[in-house]
Image (cartoon, rainbow, N blue to C red):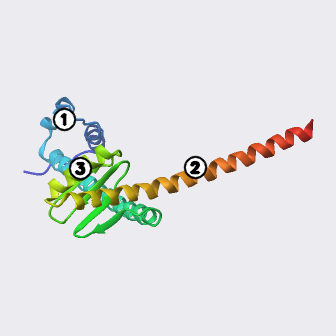
Amino acid sequence: MKKQEITVERKQEIDKLFYAETNDPESEEWRNYLIPSEQEYVNTLDDSYSKGFENLAKAIQEAVKRNETRYSDSISTIFPTETEIKDFIVTRNIGQIFTVSNGNLTKDYELLRGSEKEMEIATQIAEDFNITLEEGAEIFEEAANQNAVESEVGRKEDKNHQNIENKISLETEKEEVIDL
């Protein structure tokens, strides 16, 4: 039995159907009516699509890794993001979250201020890692210090921005006075 060739028009029709598929089963019904040579062609489209998606996913992962490295390298020069205390690594995350890790266990905590909240978090760290309350408090304090450095840099940037705005405002007022 000779393999039936697919016409250019039929390939174009199959391409149109293939690229119009969604997760809706009705959009895939056309596959039920393919002859063997058309099924082979669709299989190559499926394989190509899968490989393309796989390559895209790998490329995105690589780009994210490159950007994370660039971002973390640039940020870590501005803000201390990781500190080692005894056998623990304290990492400041985005916002008010910090991570504590000892190699066996990694936990996230919220950096809440106020003596009662600080004591709760220090106690939770001590319980989670089976250490003394003093060590838990020391770890919490390190996270707070990392956050304070970031806040101080942010305040200085805000103050510099405000000073520039004030100078611009004064220059504008001077120009208005001169024009009168």
Residues at discs 2 and 3 in contact (Cβ within 8 Å): no
- Residue found 29% across the figure and 44% down from its top: 117
x, y percent for residue 38: 18, 45
Comparing 94 with 25, the one in front is 94
Quarter holding the C terminus?
top right
x, y percent for residue 103: 18, 66
Comparing 11 with 127, the one in front is 127
Q: Is residue 47 visible?
A: no
- Residue found 63% across the figure and 53% down from its top: 160
Residue 57 vertical position relative to residue 166 in the rendered view, above or below = below
In this figure, which residue is indicated by the disc labeled 1? Answer: 28
Ranked by sequence position, the earlier of labels 3 and 1 is: 1
Secondary structure type for disc 3:
helix
Place residue 114 in its image quadrant. top left
Residues at discs 3 and 1 in contact (Cβ within 8 Å): no
Ranked by sequence position, the earlier of labels 2 and 3 is: 3
State the separation of the CA atoms marked 3 and 1.
Answer: 14 Å
Residue 38 vertical position relative to residue 62 in the rendered view, above or below = above
In this figure, which residue is indicated by the disc labeled 3? Answer: 45
In this figure, which residue is indicated by the disc labeled 2? Answer: 158
- Residue found 42% across the figure and 64% down from its top: 76
State the separation of the CA atoms marked 2 and 3.
Answer: 55 Å
Q: Amino acid at mark 3?
A: Leu
Q: Amino acid at mark 1?
A: Glu
